[in-house]
């Protein structure tokens, strides 16, 4: 073969590779959007069919598949699925953003179950994650639900003026403080807010 033919073949292979990469990228984005839509609209049966398809297994990385499985566990309240997925994700090398997502979900999951040691483990991981963006709310939740404190009470009351979802944590802070009247007051405010949504 002459140089000109080799050059044309090389250019053709490069173009085919670029085209394949672009098609795969756009198809992958479409699949991710489909899976997200099915899962978050609670269409679990169709989500499962799509998730278990060969094309999805080919397109998604093992980490992405585990992240979807973790979300499925939370949305369908399958405690065993959540625990097994968290255990599996411990074996993957996650980037800092993925660590933040997984560890924050794990922290709040174990906190809600009252499993303090596991919650403390994920709290420590989140504090050491330089790219985790929500350390204020993390520290506030830790103080309220793990330490049974109310250190953030005054700040949270101010924040509740623009974000009424804070009424729930304020009620819990007052419970920790032993203030039954304000605990009841903020519990009712939170219930009224949620009923209005």
Image: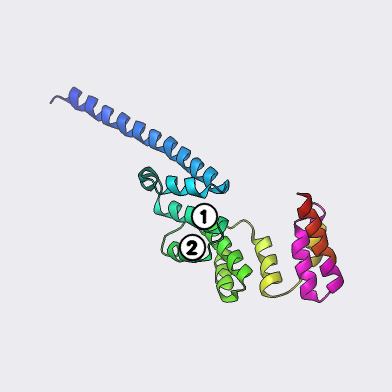
The numbered mark at residue 81 is 2
Q: Report if the CB atoms under discs 1 and 2 are less than 8 Å apart.
A: yes
Main SS category, magenta section: helix
Q: Is 65 above or below relative to 13?
A: below
Q: What range of the chain is rendered magenta? A: 160-184
Q: Sequence-wise, which precedes: disc 1 or disc 2? A: 1
Picture residue at 23% right of the left edge, 24% below the top: 8
Crowding at label 2, few (<14), some or many (≥20) Cα neighbours within 10 Å?
some
Quarter of the image where one finds residue 92: bottom left
The numbered mark at residue 72 is 1
Residue 148 highlighted magenta (yes or no): no
Asked if one can make out residue 163 in the rendered structure from this viewpoint, the answer is no
- What is the distance, in whole Å, between disc 1 and disc 2 at their CAs? 8 Å
Give x and y (percent) for residue 134: 64, 58
Secondary structure beneath label 2: helix
Q: Check the image and tell me how it is coloured.
A: rainbow
Left or right of residue 187, residue 24 in this image? left
Give x and y (percent) for residue 51: 43, 48
Picture residue at 48% right of the left edge, 43% below the top: 32
Give x and y (percent) for residue 28: 43, 40
Q: Residue furthest front?
A: 45
Left or right of residue 16, residue 123 in this image? right
Residue 175 highlighted magenta (yes or no): yes
Q: Is residue 182 or residue 4 the one in the foreground?
A: 182
Picture residue at 50% right of the left edge, 58% below the top: 70
Asked if one can make out residue 29 in the rendered structure from this viewpoint, the answer is yes
């Amino acid at each position: 073969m002459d140089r000109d033919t080799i050059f044309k073949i090389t250019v053709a292979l490069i173009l085919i590779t670029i085209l394949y990469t672009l098609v795969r990228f756009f198809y992958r984005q479409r699949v991710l959007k489909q899976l997200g839509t099915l899962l978050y609209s609670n269409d679990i049966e169709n989500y499962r069919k799509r998730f278990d398809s060969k094309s999805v297994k080919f397109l998604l990385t093992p980490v992405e598949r585990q992240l979807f499985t973790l979300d499925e566990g939370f949305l369908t309240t399958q405690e065993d699925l959540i625990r097994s997925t968290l255990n599996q994700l411990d074996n993957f090398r996650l980037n800092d953003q993925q660590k933040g997502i997984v560890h924050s979900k794990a922290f709040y999951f174990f906190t809600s179950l009252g499993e303090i040691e596991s919650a403390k483990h994920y709290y420590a991981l989140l504090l050491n994650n330089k790219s985790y963006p929500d350390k204020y709310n993390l520290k506030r939740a830790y103080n309220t639900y793990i330490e049974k404190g109310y250190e953030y009470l005054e700040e949270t009351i101010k924040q509740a003026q623009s974000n009424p979802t804070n009424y729930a944590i304020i009620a819990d802070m007052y419970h920790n403080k032993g203030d039954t009247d304000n605990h009841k007051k903020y519990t009712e405010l939170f219930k009224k807010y949620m009923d209005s949504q």
